[in-house]
Each structure stands twice: as structure tokens, then as C-alpha cells.
Image: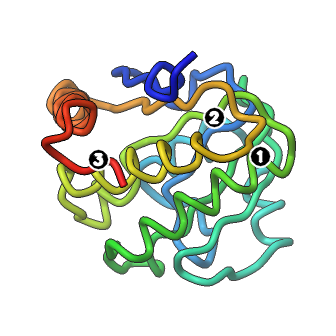
Amino acid sequence: MNTADRIEIRQGDLTEMDTDAIVNAANNDLQLGGGVAGAIRRKGGPRIQVECDEIGTIPVGGAAITSGGDLKTRHVIHAASMQLGGMTSAHALRSSTALALRIAAQKGLKTIAFPAVGTGIAGFPVPECAEIMLREALRHLHGPTSLEKIYFVLFDDKTRATFEEVFREMQSGRIPAE
């Protein structure tokens, strides 16, 4: 299976994914407030926030793993692309995405699902998010990893279409994949 076949882009509800892990678009205080984090808190129950509180603050650009609480997924990897109430930067998005993938591989996970990290509350542009996250996913899959499938589960049609277009452009070489 080639690397591109191990990435799937779809529209849907990230919190309904039955994968080894889903990724939370987190702040570095690991407070599950609004957006993706709020949906994870509501559907996953209080245990996830309790585990986040036990971890405490992590660096912007970092990531941490908890259980999936009451979700179908077994783990939530919290990719901290911003400070609480702050904005996402390209550097923080790149770093937190790469670290989330590394944590998944270190845990021997086979499937992971990402949202469009930083594009909601944190206001990061969707096309740039797609380019950064897809590039990090491809880079990760080119090395040794336990991950067999990386999903990008996007909330709306416009975001899904943007991720698909960026991925097509990477596969055709119009956008460099490295």
C-alpha cells in the first residue's frame, strides 16, 4: 500500500470515530472548552478532563495522550497548537501534529483521526492547515511507524473539499509534499 493510500479524508463527526485515537485541537492548558475540545468533553465524559488536569500544562506545539473516556476511540491525543484563548501558528501546528503522530506510533496504535486543528476558535486558515497537516502525515508515513491509516475527519463540506484539493495538489507535485 503506498503512502497516499494510508490517508483518508472524510466529512463527519470526529467524536464518532472508532479508531485507536482521535486528536483534540487543544490549548496548552489542556482545558476542554469549546469547539472540538468541547465536543470531546461532552461526548467523552468527565474522565478525559480529569486525566488532562493530572497532566497539567504542556508546551504550545506539544501533545499529550489520555484515554478516550466514553468515546468509541481508545485514546485522545491532545495536540496543543495554541494557548488558551490564543491563536494557532504554523510552527505550533506543525510541531503538535508531528508529536501527535509520534505519540501514536510510540503507543503502537494503528489508526488515528485528526480534525482541522486550529481552524475553528484559533482562526488558522484552512488551506494552510491542510498543507501543514497533510505534509506531516506523509512525512510520518515515510518512516517506520505502527500507523496503518490516518484519517482527516472534517466538520463541513468546504473544509473537506479544501483538504481534498490540497492533497490532490501534493500528489500531483503542484504543492511539494516535503
Q: Which element type, helix, strand or loop, lies under badge 2?
A: strand
Q: Residues within 10 Å of mark 1 (few under 14, many from 20)?
A: some
101 is higher (above) or lower (below) than 156: below
Q: Which element type, helix, strand or loop, lies under badge 1?
A: helix
Q: Quadrant of the N terminus?
A: top right
Residue at left offset 24%, top offset 63%? 124
171 is higher (above) or lower (below) than 47: above
Mark 3 to mark 1: distance in Å? Answer: 21 Å
Which callout, 3 or 2, points at the residue further toward the start of the chain?
2
Q: Quadrant of the C terminus?
A: bottom left
Q: Which element type, helix, strand or loop, lies under badge 3?
A: helix
Residue 94 coordinates in the image, percent (x, y): 44, 66
Residue 17 occupies quadrant: top right
11 is higher (above) or lower (below) than 152: above
Q: Which of these two is toward me, 44 or 97? A: 97
Is 108 positioned to the left or the right of 91 in the image?
right
Which callout, 2 or 1, points at the residue further toward the start of the chain?
1
Circle 2 or circle 1, nearest the eye: 1
> Mark 2 — residue?
112
Q: Which of these two is toward me, 134 or 3? A: 3
Q: Amino acid at mark 3?
A: Ala
Is 20 positioned to the left or the right of 167 in the image?
right
Residue 105 numbered tag: 1
> Mark 3 — residue?
130
110 is higher (above) or lower (below) than 84: above
Q: Amino acid at mark 1?
A: Ala
Residue at left offset 58%, top offset 48%? 140
Q: Residues within 10 Å of mark 2 (few under 14, many from 20)?
A: many
Residue at left offset 73%, top offset 64%? 64
Q: Which of these two is toward me, 156 or 130? A: 130
Residue 58 coordinates in the image, percent (x, y): 67, 80
Q: Residues within 10 Å of mark 3 (few under 14, many from 20)?
A: many
